[in-house]
Amino acid sequence: METKLKTENPFGPEAPISKHLDENVRQIQSIFGSSVDLIMKEWSYGPEFRYKAVTFYYETLMQKTKNYMKYTLQDLVDHEVGPGMESTLEDLVMFFEHDGVSQKSAVLLDRVDQIVKDILDGHLVIFLDQWDKALSYKAFSVETRQVTEPVNESVVQGPRESTVESLEKNMGLLRIRLKTPSFRMVKANGGGKTNTDIVYAYLSDVVDSELLNEFERRFEAVKQMEVLETSYIEQILEDSTYSPFPQHQYTERPDVVTAALLRGKIAVLVQGSSGVLLCPGLFTDFFQSSEDYYQRTLISSLIRFLRVFAFIIALTLPSIYIALTTYHTELVPTVLLLAVIDSREGIPLPAFFEALLMEFFFELLREAGVRLPRPVGSAVSIVGALIIGDAAISAGIASPIMVIIVALTGIASFAIPQYGIAISLRILQFPLMISASLLGGFGVMIMLILFLLHLTKLRSLGQPYLSPLAPLRFSPLKDVFIRAPIRILQRGLRDRQFNRQGR
């Protein structure tokens, strides 16, 4: 017989389980109240079915292929096929309390708060009348996305596995890559109504002890807050809330997480989130891609230089154009200056407002392309940019060279592998454009110096954000702007591990 629970009551106390089945049922009913998917199933077993038992579970969280009461009774007959209905209460109590539970997914519970947590986690809990303990079977089974190719971090050469929304799958993807006892995973729970499962991982013989202590100190605040996604944890852990620069790194690739752990970082995984948070996230980390380590040294180093150049273009190109055409025309070659003047003939707006208008339309199209359904979004972005750019030139609102500059700025921002730093560029280019319109090249230099001062002051989990550039450390520089050969990087990892063990 199955019945839906009806009684409403706030969360019950941390009390021991009663020997009386009716009291346990009332206690669970008062805690969980009425919910369409919470099932209470009554059982009878033993000779002439004279013994009573009750099962509680959320049918939306559990698999429906097993008869757990039947398995419980068969524990007494060495898993032989049969109903096990000759078992008495005394047999069950004697077996489970002295020999333990033979089902690998089952545990014994003796407190109400343990039962509440297990039911919420997708377990099936069985109460027996005249027994002050309960059996809890791990029966969680909710459909999740299968491991597929990463969407945001695609590569030409390298693994094509992506983390998914299942915490256990993500932990397995990491464990299979790090076959060492020093790989530790610590489980915690978020607070509030969500009680989200969270795991942070590290290599005990590689991670800096001070860094780990600082992380665990800040992580205590996470346990008191509602956590729906990994980004919630980032906002709790970050040093500077209002900084435009990301202070932690995101990835969907298990190989990237593995490489970060080998460099002494800490990874945070959250149930229901496919993104993995890597702490700390330093400025130089955002210019690196997993594919850098799967290609030859020369090619990887050239691509990294290209990304740095793309970062400079995306940050400064519109402001440099505004400064040159407004204040420093003498620095522009004559032929190029005549071409610029000719293209701007009849444009009613100053260079600053022209750039501001085109950047606004470009950002609007980029955001629309992200939010629209994927088959439609790409078409809207491409067609919209072509139509608006051509229409702006035809209407005399923008010059062709300004359209080219805005397009180059957008393309350069796409060349940066980490989305977080690309968003920062979209924000920072506007104060640079304003300073260029007011003070020309002098204003651009002042703003860049302010950005640099902010970066030197910024920290991530207490680590200098510009490390190893400031403070300067020569050893890690072999994996910043250039990528040294793998044998040299491997030697550096071994030396770092040796130094940690020697402390």
Image (cartoon, grey):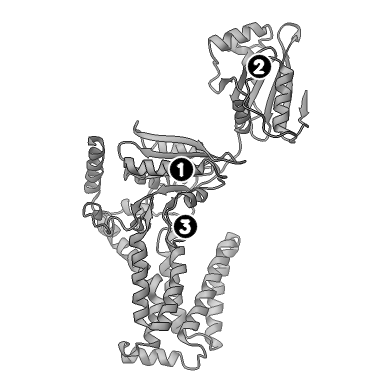
> Where residue 446 sits: x, y (%)?
35, 75
Check whether the beta carbons of the residues at disc 3 and disc 2 lie within 8 A of each other.
Answer: no
> Mark on residue 93?
none
Query: Which residue is tagged 1?
Result: 219
Query: Which residue is tagged 3?
Result: 241
> Mark on residue 70?
2
In the picture, the quarter occupied by the C terminus is top left
Of mark 2 and mark 1, the one earlier in the sequence is 2
* Number of other residues with Cα within 10 Å of mark 3, as a class: few under 14, some 14 to 19, many 20 or more: few
Above or below, 10 relative to 299: above
Residue shown at 22% from the left, 35% from the top: 502
Above or below, 175 relative to 417: above
Nearest to the observer: residue 56 or residue 304: 56
Circle 1 sits in a helix, a strand or a loop, which is it?
helix
In 3D space, how far apart are the residues under numbered discs 3 and 2 (Cα atoms)? Answer: 55 Å
Residue shown at 55% from the left, 18% from the top: 103
Amino acid type, label 1: Phe
Left or right of residue 89, residue 408 in this image: left
In 3D space, how far apart are the residues under numbered discs 3 and 1 (Cα atoms)? Answer: 16 Å
Circle 2 sits in a helix, a strand or a loop, which is it?
helix
Of mark 3 and mark 1, the one earlier in the sequence is 1
Of marks 3 and 2, the one in the foreground: 3
Residue shown at 64% from the left, 31% from the top: 62
Of mark 3 and mark 2, the one earlier in the sequence is 2
> Where residue 256 sits: x, y (%)?
39, 48
Amino acid type, label 3: Thr
Circle 3 sits in a helix, a strand or a loop, which is it?
loop
Left or right of residue 381, residue 19 in this image: right
Above or below, 480 relative to 7: below
Left or right of residue 234, residue 298 in this image: left
Q: Is residue 77 visible?
A: no
